[in-house]
Amino acid sequence: MKYDELYKTFKEGIPEGYSFFEIKEKENLINETDGIHIVFGMVIVPYILHIVQNNKLHEINKVFSFLENMAICEDIKVKEVLDFTVLEQLADEGHDILRQCKRYMEVNTLKHCEEVEKYFLYHQIG
């Protein structure tokens, strides 16, 4: 899994979402010069929310398997996209949405998510 090709790899792995990606890219004026964090934040996170809220299990399984691969990737920049963009934005959506998403997370993604939650909790109180 390569940081610079993360979005391309995601789209190739989940072709079912192609029309959704295209719409979000146009809405947010996304192109290949935008950084990976921006693209994941403005295209992939809304897609995750869409498929979870619409119970699209086939796509959910593929997406959360991709997230798990990000969680175990040796490239720290890939993990940072998972933590600081995907999981933080999901946490920002509120407890109910995050709880829904956590049902589909695999072991390592869940560990990353719990760390993000601890960070939020600590910084809310502290």
Image: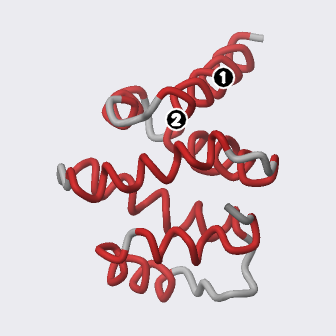
Which residue position holds label 1? 115
Q: Residue at x 44, y 48 (%)?
A: 65
The span from disc 2 to disc 1 (Cα, nearest Å) is 11 Å
Is 89 on the left-hand or right-hand side of 21?
Answer: right
Q: Residue at x 49, y 53 (%)?
A: 66
Location of residue 56 in the rendering, given as x and y in whole percent from the top left corner: 20, 55
Location of residue 27 in the rendering, given as x and y in whole percent from the top left corner: 47, 83
As helix, strand or loop, the secondary structure at mark 1 comes to helix
Q: Is residue 126 above or below residue 56?
A: above
In this orientation, which residue lies closer to the viewer: 49 or 16?
Answer: 16
As helix, strand or loop, the secondary structure at mark 2 comes to helix
Is 7 on the left-hand or right-hand side of 73?
Answer: left
- Specify the color scheme: secondary structure
Amino acid carrying label 1: it is Glu
Location of residue 2 in the rendering, given as x and y in whole percent from the top left corner: 73, 65
Label 1 CA crowd tier, 10 Å (few <14, some 14–19, many 20+): some
Q: Residue furthest right?
A: 76
Q: Nearer the viewer, mark 2 or mark 1?
A: 1
Picture quadrant of residue 99 = top left
In this orientation, which residue lies closer to the viewer: 96 or 108?
Answer: 108
Q: Is residue 2 above or below residue 18?
A: above
Which residue position holds label 2? 91
Picture quadrant of residue 100 = top left
Amino acid carrying label 2: it is Ala
Q: Residue at x 70, y 11 (%)?
A: 125
